[in-house]
Amino acid sequence: MVSVIPASHVSLALLEARYGLREATQPDFFSEWTQGLGDLTELEKQYLDRVKTHFKRLLKSPPLLENSVKGQSGERPL
Protein backbone atom coordinates (compact mmCIF):
# COMPACT_ATOMS: atom_id res chain seq x y z
CA MET A 1 0.00 0.00 0.00
CA VAL A 2 1.22 3.50 -0.81
CA SER A 3 1.89 5.84 2.10
CA VAL A 4 1.18 9.52 1.52
CA ILE A 5 2.70 12.11 3.84
CA PRO A 6 2.04 15.84 3.46
CA ALA A 7 5.26 17.66 2.58
CA SER A 8 4.80 19.94 5.60
CA HIS A 9 5.15 16.87 7.86
CA VAL A 10 8.26 15.40 6.25
CA SER A 11 11.67 15.64 7.85
CA LEU A 12 14.92 13.85 7.25
CA ALA A 13 14.62 12.17 10.65
CA LEU A 14 11.16 10.83 9.73
CA LEU A 15 12.40 9.45 6.40
CA GLU A 16 15.37 7.80 8.07
CA ALA A 17 13.22 6.19 10.75
CA ARG A 18 10.23 5.15 8.63
CA TYR A 19 11.87 4.19 5.33
CA GLY A 20 15.48 3.45 6.22
CA LEU A 21 16.73 6.40 4.18
CA ARG A 22 20.47 6.83 4.54
CA GLU A 23 23.18 9.00 3.10
CA ALA A 24 25.00 7.81 -0.01
CA THR A 25 28.67 8.40 0.75
CA GLN A 26 30.17 6.94 -2.41
CA PRO A 27 32.13 9.69 -4.18
CA ASP A 28 30.91 8.48 -7.56
CA PHE A 29 27.18 8.41 -6.67
CA PHE A 30 26.57 11.42 -8.95
CA SER A 31 29.68 11.27 -11.11
CA GLU A 32 28.37 13.95 -13.49
CA TRP A 33 28.63 16.45 -10.63
CA THR A 34 32.35 15.89 -10.23
CA GLN A 35 33.69 15.35 -13.73
CA GLY A 36 35.74 18.12 -15.30
CA LEU A 37 36.17 20.13 -12.10
CA GLY A 38 39.47 21.34 -10.69
CA ASP A 39 40.84 19.99 -7.42
CA LEU A 40 39.81 21.68 -4.17
CA THR A 41 42.40 23.07 -1.80
CA GLU A 42 42.65 21.66 1.71
CA LEU A 43 41.07 24.84 3.09
CA GLU A 44 38.13 24.52 0.68
CA LYS A 45 37.67 20.88 1.72
CA GLN A 46 37.64 21.90 5.39
CA TYR A 47 35.02 24.59 4.70
CA LEU A 48 32.85 22.15 2.76
CA ASP A 49 33.09 19.52 5.52
CA ARG A 50 32.01 22.12 8.05
CA VAL A 51 29.07 23.27 5.91
CA LYS A 52 28.03 19.66 5.32
CA THR A 53 28.10 18.88 9.05
CA HIS A 54 26.03 21.95 9.95
CA PHE A 55 23.56 21.33 7.11
CA LYS A 56 22.95 17.73 8.20
CA ARG A 57 22.43 18.85 11.79
CA LEU A 58 19.87 21.45 10.69
CA LEU A 59 18.02 18.92 8.53
CA LYS A 60 17.73 16.42 11.37
CA SER A 61 16.90 18.95 14.10
CA PRO A 62 15.64 22.24 12.68
CA PRO A 63 15.63 25.19 15.07
CA LEU A 64 12.38 26.40 16.58
CA LEU A 65 10.94 29.30 14.67
CA GLU A 66 9.68 32.39 16.45
CA ASN A 67 6.03 31.50 15.76
CA SER A 68 6.56 28.09 17.37
CA VAL A 69 7.39 29.60 20.73
CA LYS A 70 4.81 32.40 20.79
CA GLY A 71 1.75 31.97 22.93
CA GLN A 72 -1.65 31.42 21.32
CA SER A 73 -2.52 35.08 21.81
CA GLY A 74 0.53 36.05 19.81
CA GLU A 75 2.37 37.27 22.89
CA ARG A 76 5.91 36.19 23.51
CA PRO A 77 6.45 33.82 26.44
CA LEU A 78 8.28 35.14 29.46
Image (cartoon, rainbow, N blue to C red):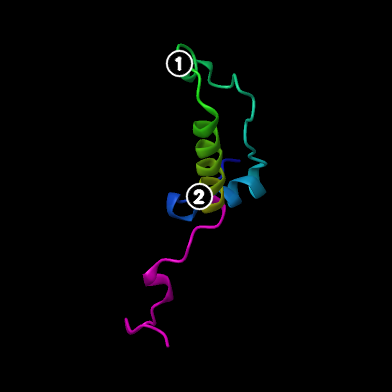
Identify the residue at horizontal 67%, vertical 41% (top origin). Answer: 20
In the displayed structure, 42 sits above or below 12; it is above
Residue 77 lies in the magenta stretch: yes
Point out the tag, 1 or 2, that comes first from the N-terminus. 2
Q: Nearer the viewer, residue 44 or 75?
A: 44
Identify the residue at horizontal 45%, vertical 16% (top origin). Answer: 37
Secondary element under disc 2, as helix, strand or loop, is: loop
In the rendered view, does 61 fall on the left or right side of 66?
right
Q: Nearer the viewer, residue 5 or 47?
A: 47
User: In the rendered image, which quarter contains the N terminus?
Assistant: top right
Q: Residue at label 2?
A: 5
Measured as percent of width and height from the top left, residue 55 is found at 51, 46
Farthest top residue?
Answer: 36
Measured as percent of width and height from the top left, residue 51 is found at 50, 43
In the displayed structure, 55 sits above or below 69; it is above
- Give, as a three-letter code, the residue at label 2: Ile
Q: Which mark is residue 37?
A: 1
User: In the rendered image, which quarter contains the C terminus?
Assistant: bottom left
User: Range of the magenta residues?
Assistant: 59-78
In the displayed structure, 17 sits above or below 2; it is below
- Give, as a three-letter code, the residue at label 1: Leu
Q: Which mark is residue 19?
A: none
Secondary element under disc 1, as helix, strand or loop, is: loop
Q: Magenta region, mostly helix, strand or loop?
A: loop
Calculate the distance from the C-alpha at mark 1 to the C-alpha at mark 2.
38 Å
